[in-house]
Amino acid sequence: MGRKVSEILILFVVSIFTVGCVKDKPTGTVAVNNTGNVYVVCEGNMGNGDGSLYNYNPITDSVSGDVFKSTNNMPLGDVFQSMTRIGDSLFLCVNNSDKIVVLNAVTKKLAGTISIPKPRYIVAVNRSLAYVSKLYSNKVYAIDPTTLEVKNATELPYNNSEGMLLQGGTLWVCNWDTSCRSITGIDALSGQKTRTISIGKYAPHAILADKDGLLWVMSGNVTKGRGAALSRIDPSTGAVVRQLDFREKSDPVKPVFNKTKDTLWFIQVKYDGSDADNGIYRMSIYDTSLPAAPLIKASKYQYYWALGIDPANGNVYVGDPKGFVQKGQVSIYNNAGSLQKTFSVGVGPGQFYFDK
């Protein structure tokens, strides 16, 4: 579920799994048969069970609505958080339904489910190993994408595992916990904790790597008094080479890189109806200050909740949840910020997945 919505969930008690060893070699990427489709992950309104998967094909300029329900004749579930592709399957984290839904990537037919409490994001190591982050516990889970089994779990020093990144043989994990000021490195094959890097700021929730191999960590929980920051980190030394603090009450979320990983894009969100510090921002990885104004500005009583950069042409996809009370809207802009197209999707568009 989205960061704003997730804070009102009831604490979930989870099962404990024993940490074990995995033999497969990490690959960093998993080969797929790409389709050119742009999938829109629509969270739905928490408690309504109206999460949905939409599909936009930019070649045919066509939108397919509620793909899972129309194909499988059943609802997807409550709060569709994220999706990733591993091999010929799509893995859908349905957060508040405590499950990962697995689909055939071609037919969209249900292939199975994996029961994990409050799953957030999935990072694949290879075809037989992937990691799942989750809310309300100090664990990440290892799953086998081929057998759909939970293999084991790795305990972390803080709760709320959130953003993850596979870099070489290391899985970096953010814990969106207001007491946490570090990221944890896990050996991707064994599941053992190997490193801790201090980021100096509280509540890390997103992590990416730029063209130079340096880490970018976004942190903060404004509603709980933890100011937001971007930290650029050298993983070889653990040094924070640049730290950029956002203005008080600024709430940046969901950073993404362009294809060449030299330009960082992110959303700033305002829930109170104001238009200050509200919209889509971009910056070079070599900038020494944060951008002063958005490239795509949100209007009053509007905020954005999804952001993606099409690797094929650099177009910018933006999702407007419209308060999670009606159908959302996707807008496509060119790299200069000029609007190209809009179309309607399900409730609460929160993520884009480019199958390219």
Image (tube, rainbow, N blue to C red):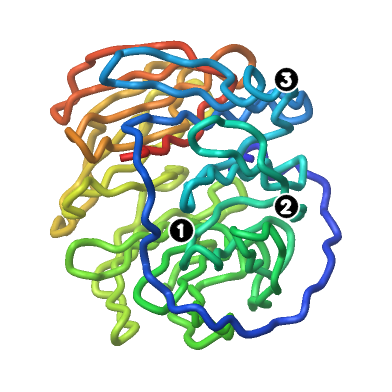
On screen, 16 above or below 104?
A: below
Cα distance between the residues tagged 2 and 3 = 19 Å
- Residue 355 location, quadrant: top left
Task: Report the mark closest to the observer, 3 or 1.
Answer: 3
Q: Amino acid at mark 2?
A: Ile
Sooner in the amino-acid sequence: mark 2 or mark 1: 2
Residue at label 3?
73
Q: Looking at the image, is mark 2 or mark 1 nearer the viewer?
A: 2
**Where, quadrant-wise, is the N terminus in this rendering?**
top right
User: Element under label 3?
Assistant: loop
Q: Which residue is mark 2?
A: 114
Q: Residues within 10 Å of mark 3 (few under 14, many from 20)?
A: few
Q: CA distance from mark 3 to mark 1?
A: 40 Å
- SS under mark 2: strand
- Front-most of residues 20 and 31: 31
- Name the amino acid type tagged 1: Ser
Q: Which mark is residue 219?
A: 1
Mark 2 or 3: the one toward you: 3
Q: Does 246 appear above or below 273?
A: below
Identify the residue at horizontal 13%, vertical 59% (top origin): 286
Quarter holding the C terminus?
A: top left
